[in-house]
Amino acid sequence: MPDWLTDLPLVDHHCHGVNGTTVDRATFEDLITESDRAAPPGTTFFDTQLGFAIRRHCAPILDLPVFADPDDYLARRAELGPAEVNARLLRASGISDYLVETGHKSDEILTPQQMGDTAAAGYGEVVRLERIAEQVAGEGDPADFVVAFADRLDSHLSAAAGVKSIAAYRCGFDIDPSRPSPDEVADAVQQWRRSTPNGTPLRLSDPVLVRHGWWAAIERAVPIQLHVGYGDPDVDLHRCNPLLLTDLLRLARGSGASFMLLHCYPFHREAGYLAHVFEHVYCDVGLAVTYTGAQSAQVIAESLELTPFGKALFSSDAFGAAELFHLGALLFRRGLARALDTWAGADWPPHEQQRIATMIATGNARRVYRLDQMATTTFGTGP
Amino acid sequence: MPDWLTDLPLVDHHCHGVNGTTVDRATFEDLITESDRAAPPGTTFFDTQLGFAIRRHCAPILDLPVFADPDDYLARRAELGPAEVNARLLRASGISDYLVETGHKSDEILTPQQMGDTAAAGYGEVVRLERIAEQVAGEGDPADFVVAFADRLDSHLSAAAGVKSIAAYRCGFDIDPSRPSPDEVADAVQQWRRSTPNGTPLRLSDPVLVRHGWWAAIERAVPIQLHVGYGDPDVDLHRCNPLLLTDLLRLARGSGASFMLLHCYPFHREAGYLAHVFEHVYCDVGLAVTYTGAQSAQVIAESLELTPFGKALFSSDAFGAAELFHLGALLFRRGLARALDTWAGADWPPHEQQRIATMIATGNARRVYRLDQMATTTFGTGP
Amino acid sequence: MPDWLTDLPLVDHHCHGVNGTTVDRATFEDLITESDRAAPPGTTFFDTQLGFAIRRHCAPILDLPVFADPDDYLARRAELGPAEVNARLLRASGISDYLVETGHKSDEILTPQQMGDTAAAGYGEVVRLERIAEQVAGEGDPADFVVAFADRLDSHLSAAAGVKSIAAYRCGFDIDPSRPSPDEVADAVQQWRRSTPNGTPLRLSDPVLVRHGWWAAIERAVPIQLHVGYGDPDVDLHRCNPLLLTDLLRLARGSGASFMLLHCYPFHREAGYLAHVFEHVYCDVGLAVTYTGAQSAQVIAESLELTPFGKALFSSDAFGAAELFHLGALLFRRGLARALDTWAGADWPPHEQQRIATMIATGNARRVYRLDQMATTTFGTGP
């Protein structure tokens, strides 16, 4: 890998916070899988591409030999303590800026500002549309929901860089994508509240309200992150093929909003097609890079078949374990190095390789999220 | 790359004509993307696999240094003039014969004969079923459509090598594939004409009439090209997975017609499966090779996993820019060389490699399209 | 390839028997394709990845030069005789144990015991759910079907290692996966018998009875093999994407049953996702490895992106021709060697590579099928 790629700053345009406590082996294994159950007897999530990548690449950051035993790794992790582990792994990642999505278990992880402090990096926030709806829907009259949602969203967007939708987890993409009327929205909120038992938190799954969130964001012409593809077993994976978004993307042309397709595996070629033909679509293979480990170079190369170099981004989609940030960045660099080496032969001039790598690593995110205009972050001050 | 592969003649079994005029940068960028909009601010379609391939491989053909700047490239292109640019790029491609599909914007591009003259190569024509229907439907009584369509098709087929259907763009493949009755066809034509405002050109999208075209071709036992997969944003890509053609392929067994699945990306493995199990199915990865540029070697290798070597073909699907022909051929050679190198190790005898490469490059097309029996072309006289 | 990988024993957890007779070229070509028709004029199934692999790797086992001509190969095959050919190819495969599925044309092939004898290897049986239903349904009163099916299944399972379902071939996976009631089952059997003409063998395709078989197996907490993806043209391939099994997998959590997804191509990444997030899901790329030949290394690498190393298995899915067993094993070793070489660089310790390869080759199958507890086989006595 050339030095310039080792040292290239990265904007992680979609991630969550790290956990600030010491975790036992069971909890750590849960952080390194998308499964919601323990590995079956006789197996461990350390025996995966991700587990091998942790032992290979993270162990030395904690002063352990390469391929340290999992129990030794966790013992050393506990010995150093979470603050030291997190600081070492995050700072060594070379991620210069973190856009932290705060809608998932935010009480268990560091805030965006704490992330910036721990990593000595810039930071910003991305807000989850469905979380805002769940907060607002419980507060007032259903008839006031549209206005209250708009106010809350605008309030968040005064500081946040964009929004995120987890429609993939709640209703899938094979829905009517059109904008619902205010009456439809009010009826859906009323029905939602009625059907939720007292004391149970509101959990949004009604496509009407998912679409309402989308269109509120489209109207505001902001970057809209969409979880696409691979995730935990709550997902009906065949219902979140990004091609099912085609009609939504057509409807939103000319709005000024951008659609940021996240992860996308195993539909990353389909996502690349959308990023190629629709001027307002962008994509990454975050999460998939981390989980496919040593094999991620192929996934990265495939994601750059049709995706214009000005439309591809870097993300880790890391949550909880600092290892996921570290590996997201390291494997991205290695995969991009392998791809460039394969493609370029002796033919692509180094400065052209560096130019497109920089676009993907930082430039595209800075432009689309307008990061240089953000007042509330420290973008640009990272390593 | 071995010399024999560099020099291997190619039958381009599906392409369009080149543009004969000087184009400005915006027009040229439009010719090197499947998008129907300009690249968004801050980006350019030169920053894609295809754009990089043009700067790498086509610039030297125009006497420019490798990786010439896009503006320099277009200035040199204008300086040489379209006739010289087209002749240089086409003749250097090593394509010996062009099967030109004439149903798309044929007034903007060279005719098949002009293509043959410019390229100093053989040529033939493929006619578009939907275009014939659009011409015939406006001319007489709807009740006469079936006969008029048959007459027009037969007239074309007295010279043309086969037919093409763009059902993928008009209604997708998730339709009843059976042959419609003459009454259904007549009703559909009448309804179509009634619903088209006066002065508006007829545009076929009714599945009944698409199917009618398919079955007219099946009855005539000719090669039927089908656009499959990747294309412009008019396509609902998830509705043109070739597996959705399975029932049609079953119904057409024994008819003598052959189905030529074009492009197929990202469903080229699915297409390979169909070519393997159905005796009358063939496939290529044209268009995808050109657009995936330096990464196309992987796509080509994948397309040859299940596809029998006697069922795979070469095409460029180029339209407008001569660069697309040149790169379609060059990247096909390079990708096939890489695949053979990976597969063969020291194990596959050179004459066996050459034998299957020749089948894919020319032999399969010559056999299926019966090119050696065509009276109206100059097949076999190319370089 | 390292010696340890060349010598690694393999449990073939899903295969059929070999043919014990001399076959002519047409019959042999039929055994080396998933098509149900002859190759079209001008082509042969020897000109495929599989055909090339046979000529490259199997010819020397029969004392022929590498890349012997197909006719010479078949002549030598006839000269040696089926017993010698089968013994040579099977014993040279290094497969130590065969789990033979007996539900497909079992009168044309060797029994599990004959397979063990011929190969000098351990063997066991896997029974086909749909075959049991077809046998039982014809025998008594439809109202007694549920009990009779249970008795027959229990009888088989006293010796068999698990069950297999070919739902993919009969109704696809896009069906309601819930357990049918006894009344629904009895009605379905009655309807099935009524609609089958006298003298015609019963052929199960009713989803109600497919689901009944699944749930009988789930209740018994046994390994359930499911044909997924690639197969012959009877399959509607788009209806056997394993993601369509998601709801079934959710319903069967905690049952103790394991789901063994077979073949999976071209949906092997989707299968890997399911094996990652569902604790009771396992997968292989058998059949696809054999048929993609020299290109199978990529398929194997892709199948190990998300699949935990403790969830991946080896199978050949071979039927009829001993070449398919031999190549299934040989190509699996070569593909795994290539993948480990790519992933490991200088980084993965040899003992860790050997540990996970052994899990995939034998350990996972031994654990999930509880092979060491089987009384009726000779597991562990193979080479």
Image (cartoon, coloured by chain):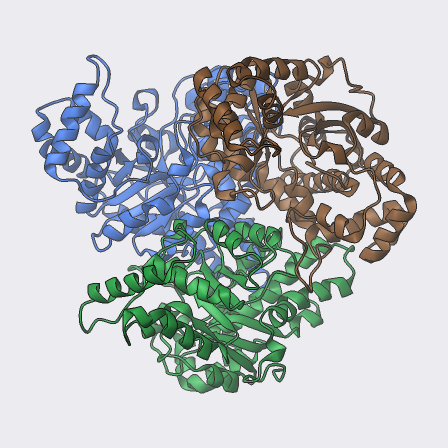
Chain colours: A brown, B blue, C green
Spot occupied by residue B134 in the image (x, y as percentages of width and height): 21, 26
| Residue at 23% from the left image edge and 40% from the top image edge | B214
Query: How many dots with numbers?
Result: 0
Spot occupied by residue C7 in the image (x, y as percentages of width and height): 66, 75
Q: Is residue A349 left or right of residue B257?
A: right
Image quadrant for the N terminus of chain A? top right
Q: Quadrant of residue A16?
A: top right
Q: Nearer the viewer, residue C358 or B218?
A: C358
Q: Nearer the viewer, residue A186 or A31?
A: A186
What is the residue that sits farthest to the front in this orientation?
Answer: A198
Give above or below for B100 relative to B344: above
Image quadrant for the C terminus of chain A? top right
Q: Is residue B35 visible?
A: no
Q: Quadrant of residue C283?
A: bottom right
Spot occupied by residue C26 in the image (x, y as percentages of width and height): 32, 71
Q: Is residue A78 left or right of residue B180?
A: right
Q: Is residue B3 visible?
A: yes
